Image (spheres, grey):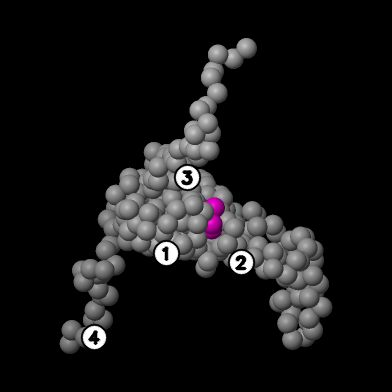
Amino acid sequence: MSDELPALPWERSRRKAGPARIPLSRDRIVDAAYAVLDREGYDKLSMRQVASELGVAVSALYVHVASKDELLELMYSRMFDDWVLPDPDPERWQEQVMEYARIWRAKLRTHRDLAKISMNGVPFAPEMLPHLNQALGIFRAGGLPDHVAAAAGDVISTFIDGFTLEEDLWDDRRRKAGEGSWENMKEALQRYFSELPPERFPHLVALSGALIGDANDERFALGIEIITRGLASFAEDAQPHPADPAGSKIDQTSSERPRPAKDPKDAT
C-alpha cells in the first residue's frame, strides 16, 4: 500500500509541470537545420522553418546564430568535425588525394543538397585552417610547384561539389517525376544515344554504352584519377632535368646560349 497521500482538493486542478525544455544551443540549431534541409531542400531552408522544427520563436535563434548565412557556415564547418587528414606521404600522395576526395563526397551525400552549401562555403574559418593546411601539405609532398599546389585544392573541391550536386539534382528529378531506378534511366539514355543517326553523330553512337555505362562511384573514381594524374604531370615537369653529356646543363631561358660558328666567308 502506498504511503503517498492524495492531493488536496484545491490542488487537483492545478496544471502539472511539463517536461523541462532543453536549452537552445548552436548544435541543436544545426541539427534542426539539417532536418529541415533533408525534408524541404536547400531552397526552402529558412530560419523560420528551423525555429518551427525546434518549437521556438524565430527570435530565439538569433541569440545563438546571427543570420542564415552564419547558420549555413556552421552547417558547412560541421562536415569537418572529427575528420583528421593523414600526415603527408611523398610516396603515397596520389592515393591520399583520391581517398580525401572519396571521403569528401561521402560526407556531402549524408544530407540532401549539402553540395549547394559546400559551394557557398569559405574554408578559411579558424576551425578549418588545420584541415586546409594539411591538405596543402599533401600536395606539396607530391612535389607540386607552389602555384599548382595552391590551386589544386580548389580544383578538386570544385569537381567534388559539382559531381555531388549533379547527383542531388538527379535524385530530385526522380523524386518529383516518380521515375524508376537509375538502372532504368541508364538503359533509356543508352538506347537514345545508340539509336541516333550514325552518319550525323558517329561518336555519340560509338560511345553510347560508355557515356552512361558506369555507376556513379566508378565515374567519380575515374574523374578524380584524371585530375590526380594531371597534377602528377606538374610534379614530373618540376623535377630537375638530367645533365647533358658534357656534364653541364644549358638554361634555355638564359641569353647565354651556344652560338653557331661563323662562316669563314663572313670574316672577310
- Name the side, left or right, on which 205 lies relative to 155: right
N-terminal label among 2 and 3: 3
Alpha carbon of mark 3 to alpha carbon of mark 1: how far?
25 Å
The residue wearing badge 2 is 169
Alpha carbon of mark 4 to alpha carbon of mark 1: how far?
71 Å
Asked whether residue 114 is drawn in magenta, I would say no
The residue wearing badge 3 is 96
Alpha carbon of mark 2 to alpha carbon of mark 3: how far?
28 Å
Do tag 4 and tag 1 residues touch (Cβ < 8 Å)?
Answer: no
The residue wearing badge 1 is 120
N-terminal label among 4 and 3: 3
Residue at left 29%, top 49%? 126
N-terminal label among 2 and 4: 2
The local secondary structure at tag 1 comes to helix
Q: Is residue 139 visible?
A: no
Disc ID at residue 265? 4
Which residue is more in the foreground, 171 or 267?
171
Q: Quadrant of the N terminus?
A: top right
**Segment tinted magenta in the rendering:** 33-37
127 versus 58 height, above or below? above
Quadrant housing residue 2: top right
N-terminal label among 3 and 1: 3
